[in-house]
């Protein structure tokens, strides 16, 4: 509560706590002109300090200073999304070109069907997406080709969402992960990237070099172990199942969070090698009855419909729990993920678009759909 100061003070009242008394000579009063003999010479009285302007009845509002704009920072996954868009440009260009200056008619849908098939989306997934897209166009009543392109992205995201699943670590210690794949799919490299991803999340990892058939496979995995500063269990010319058993036992004894078992690359048609995978799984279960907790298949995104055949064959042999899709950078066959979602919906844990350790990221259906259509 603030008081007002006026030129003329109001009469004193009972509720007045403090009276303001003006000195002689102040404005509005006249000092005596002639002093008496007994009086000392007059002493000049300084003028009172100027009275400030009346204060407002309410508290003054402090001046608002606009904060400095923070520097523009990209969202954590924005850099990854840019990489993904660049990697899928070949696939996305053929799909996006369908919607350039076109009218929404049967000819557009026929051209889109061809583009989807050329991207290795597969017949079943293509039919499903076209049916879903026509429904969305009818419900939205749009006649803008650019809007139809956005609706196709929504349809693809809806198809892929069931495949979006996180890799859970910590329910078992150690979490035993078997990794399979054909030669050349990028299996061992993906294990190195996955090791870095897990280590960044705070997990301790032990590698098992159970790919004893391929020349220099142990040395390649040892390089990844050195780059990630993790331990590796290996035997020169040892039995793959025995190496896997030793690794699971060591992982439990050393308190590791994850044991990654690198199995030999093989084609699904090599039945004797596929049987070796079953043996590794059985032996691992002897070391830990609940393991393996995850069975991952690494597939090359450039192989198109052949990747779908691999998923079916390895799932029949091992019972897959997840996929890692590599080499999506530069592929024109990125639509194969839609085929997998429609015909063999195994969860996709990770996708890769490069050779660096950080070029592996968790799968996000919406991000993939947006990148696919640029």
Image (cartoon, grey):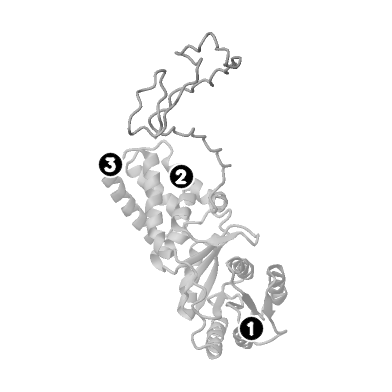
Q: CA distance from mark 1 to mark 3?
A: 62 Å
Residue behind mark 2: 96
Q: Are marks 1 and 3 in contact (CB under 8 Å)?
A: no
- Position of 356 compared to 344: left or right? right
Residue behind mark 1: 254
Question: N-terminal of the two: label 2 or label 1?
Answer: 2
To which quarter of the image does residue 2 belong? top left
Q: Tell me if I can see residue 215 in this picture.
A: no
Q: Are marks 3 and 2 in contact (CB under 8 Å)?
A: no
**Residue shown at 48% from the left, 80% from the top:** 317
Q: Nearer the viewer, residue 164 or 43?
A: 43
Outermost residue toward the front in this view: 38
Quarter of the image with the N terminus in it: top left
Across and down, in percent, residue 72 comes to 56, 42
Q: Is residue 47 above or below residue 289?
A: above
Q: Nearer the viewer, residue 63 or 165?
A: 63
Question: N-terminal of the two: label 1 or label 3?
Answer: 3
Q: CA distance from mark 3 to mark 2?
A: 21 Å
Residue behind mark 3: 141
Closer mark to the observer between disc 3 and disc 2: 3
Q: Residues within 10 Å of mark 1 (few under 14, many from 20)?
A: few
Question: N-terminal of the two: label 3 or label 2?
Answer: 2
To which quarter of the image does residue 44 belong? top right
- Position of 135 compared to 52: left or right? left
Closer mark to the observer between disc 2 and disc 1: 1
Across and down, in percent, residue 93 comes to 50, 46
Q: CA distance from mark 2 to mark 1?
A: 52 Å
């Amino acid at each position: 509560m603030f008081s007002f100061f006026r030129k003329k003070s109001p009469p004193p009242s009972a509720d007045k706590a403090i009276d303001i008394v003006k000195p002689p000579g102040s404005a509005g009063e006249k000092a005596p002109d002639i002093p008496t003999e007994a009086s000392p010479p007059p002493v000049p009285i300084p003028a009172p300090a100027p009275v400030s302007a009346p204060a407002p009845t309410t508290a003054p509002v402090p001046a608002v200073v606009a904060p400095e704009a923070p520097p523009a920072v990209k969202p954590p996954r924005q850099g990854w999304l840019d990489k993904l868009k660049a990697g899928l440009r070949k696939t996305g260009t053929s799909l996006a070109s369908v919607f350039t200056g076109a009218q929404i008619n049967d000819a557009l849908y026929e051209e889109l069907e061809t583009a989807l098939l050329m991207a290795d989306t597969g017949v079943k997934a293509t039919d499903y997406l076209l049916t879903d897209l026509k429904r969305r166009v009818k419900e939205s009543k749009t006649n803008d080709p650019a809007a139809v392109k956005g609706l196709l992205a929504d349809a693809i995201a809806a198809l892929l969402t069931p495949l979006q699943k996180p890799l859970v670590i910590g329910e078992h210690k150690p979490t035993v992960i078997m990794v399979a794949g054909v030669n050349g799919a990028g299996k061992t490299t993906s294990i190195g990237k996955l090791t870095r991803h897990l280590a960044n999340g705070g997990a301790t990892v032990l590698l098992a070099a159970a790919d004893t058939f391929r020349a220099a496979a142990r040395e390649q995995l040892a390089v990844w172990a050195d780059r990630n500063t993790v331990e590796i269990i290996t035997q020169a010319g040892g039995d793959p199942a025995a190496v896997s058993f030793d690794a699971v036992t060591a992982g439990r004894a050393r308190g590791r969070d994850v044991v990654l078992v690198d199995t030999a690359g093989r084609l699904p048609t090599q039945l004797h090698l596929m049987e070796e995978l079953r043996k590794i799984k059985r032996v691992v279960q002897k070391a830990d009855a609940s393991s393996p907790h995850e069975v991952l298949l690494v597939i090359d995104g450039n192989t198109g419909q052949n990747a779908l055949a691999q998923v079916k064959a390895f799932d029949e042999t091992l019972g897959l729990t997840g996929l890692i899709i590599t080499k999506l950078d530069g592929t024109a066959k990125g639509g194969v993920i839609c085929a997998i979602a429609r015909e063999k919906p195994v969860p996709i844990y990770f996708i890769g678009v490069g050779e660096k350790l950080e070029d592996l990221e968790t799968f996000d259906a919406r991000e993939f759909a947006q990148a696919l259509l640029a």
